[in-house]
Image (spheres, rainbow, N blue to C red):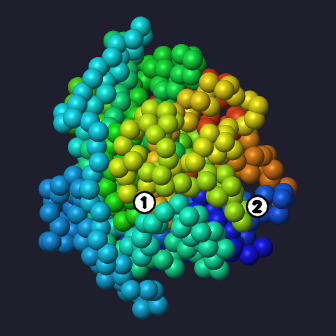
Amino acid sequence: MSSRFTSLIFVTLVVGSLGAPAPQALPAGASAVSTAIVSSASSSSIASSSTSSAVSSSLSSASSSSSSASSSSSLPSSISSSASSSGVLANASSTSTSLPPIYTGAINTTVLFNSTANFTHTETYANRTCKEFVANITASANNTIYTVTPPMNQQQMLAETYIASMATAPFNVSNSNGTRIVNGTWEIYMQYCEPTGGPTKPSVLQTIHGIVGTAGYWDATPEGDEGYSFVVAANNAGYGVLSYDRLGVGNSSKPDGIQIVQIGLEIQIAIEISTMLRNDTLGLNRTFSSVVGVGHSFGSDQLVGAAGVSPSAFDGLILTGFANNKTVSPLSSLLTFQNTIANTLPNTTAATTYDANWSELSNSYLITASQSADQLGFFSYPNYTQAALDLFTASKGTYTIGELLSMTNFMPPANYTGPVQVVTGARDAPFCATNCYDVPAALNITSKLDTAKDLFPSLNASNFETFVVPGTGHAVNFHPTAPEAYGKIIAFLTSHNL
């Protein structure tokens, strides 16, 4: 087995050994190569993205207790604490002489946004009330400087993805050159829903969707079937739920897709939103004593990273579509996700239903090419309805080259002790190679989900739980088994008084 394999979508990882111990956290600004977990138990290999040394370039220079730029005393004096919505980039020289020269091309700071200022809308249903609004979120992070530029066209995108997948050195490391502080205020679209009469549970659930997803992932109702909606299930159980389009997605700001939209900044945005929920500064007229992070896929990655940066940001973590593995194969990213420059797609319903501005995006913004790609990456045939697949394709969002390059760049949560539950489909493709039970007997674990425990060395066994959702693919919320998964999540939260 060689290192010529891609992780999940784009990033190439260095091969290591299955069950390797979690590494020590790196100091801010350090550079490291993630270590892959590879098993020969099946024809499909498995690679760890998180049990490995993580590049700590995602860490904010602000203290772990707050991600707000204005609260940081360690930001360079040249960075304004009241940055514009386009964000501010501060150059930082590399400490390595073996890397290529710093990319000095123009940084695209244009922010595309298809809402009006101070947008807000409230909808009242039979048993719940939902409010849509736009919040200005200020955050700063120490992003990686990538020396790549947006591909000129789709042919170059495919060719360079292939080259990256066959490289002998990790593409995201060999094409980086130090770090720079990214500091700004961005418009983030949000939806908050609560039971009629207000929440009865002490915690608010802050959801974070994954790659290709949007805020709508958590409130999907194909053919009007509310059984698919996590928001409805949580509201019925007494919880308030906040969902949002991540930076670069849907109705949120869309700055530079390589240098700005990276996991480090998105982690800091998630932490800032958590702080604002506690302090009632989002305009909800609600003060919550605890905040639980609920993630899917890349959103779960962000929650793991947030627990490493600021262990007190979330009182509990629900990690769906997740394990401490990522499936790898020579050209899996090309064959499954079919990374496509978003602005090259025709103006079909699938490309315009949720986000009508794809044609205006730079070439650093990508999307899955077709419904077939969505099916392969997110669904378990035949255990879904055509209506659910149609809705997924119609409501999907963009992702960026910067996210693909940086998705493993976060500090492991060595000191996190809050309750953690992992809920993943038994036939999840990206994290389980379509079989979450296919694990080497020597590991003495029930499923690949149990590998996530290695990420939390300070966690008591009583605070960790997994649930493998039967017959379900990566997009748990779009399978008929979703209500069963939601029941397990709510029972777990209740058992921990959250």
Instruction: Give the residue pinned by disc 2.
Output: 45
Task: Answer above or below: position of 58 versus 282.
Answer: below
Give residue 95's quadrant in the image. bottom left
Q: CA distance from mark 1 to mark 2?
A: 29 Å
Q: Name the image quarter holding the N terminus.
A: bottom right
Secondary structure beneath dot 2 equals strand
Identify which residue, 281 or 114, lies in the foreground.
114
- Left or right: 246 as drawn, with respect to 115: right
Mark toward the start of the polypeptide (1 vs 2): 2
Mark 1 or 2, which is nearer the eye? 1
Picture disc at residue 466: none
Q: Answer with the quarter of the image where residue 286 lies.
A: top left
Residue for point 43% across, 55% down? 365
Q: Position of residue 21 (x, y in %)?
A: 65, 67
Please provide percent x and percent y for residue 276. Answer: 27, 40
Q: Is residue 97 left or right of residue 319?
A: left
Q: Amino acid at mark 2?
A: Ser
Mark 1 vs 2: CB contact within 8 A: no
Identity of the residue furthest to the front in this view:
346
Q: Which residue is mark 1?
A: 364
Question: Would you call the spot at circle 2 few (<14 residues within 10 Å), some (14-19), or many (20 or more)?
Answer: some
Element type at marker 1?
Answer: loop
> Which residue of the protein is positioned furthest toward the top in this rendering?
126
Q: Residue 186, can we see it? A: yes
Residue type, label 1: Ser
Depicted 394 relative to depicted 301: above or below: above
Q: Return the x and y of residue 188 as percentages of the image width and height.
A: 30, 42
Report the residue at 63% width, 68% height from top: 162
- Of residues 204 and 57, the one nearer the viewer is 57
Front residue of 320/330: it is 330
Q: Tell me if I can see residue 301 in this picture.
A: no
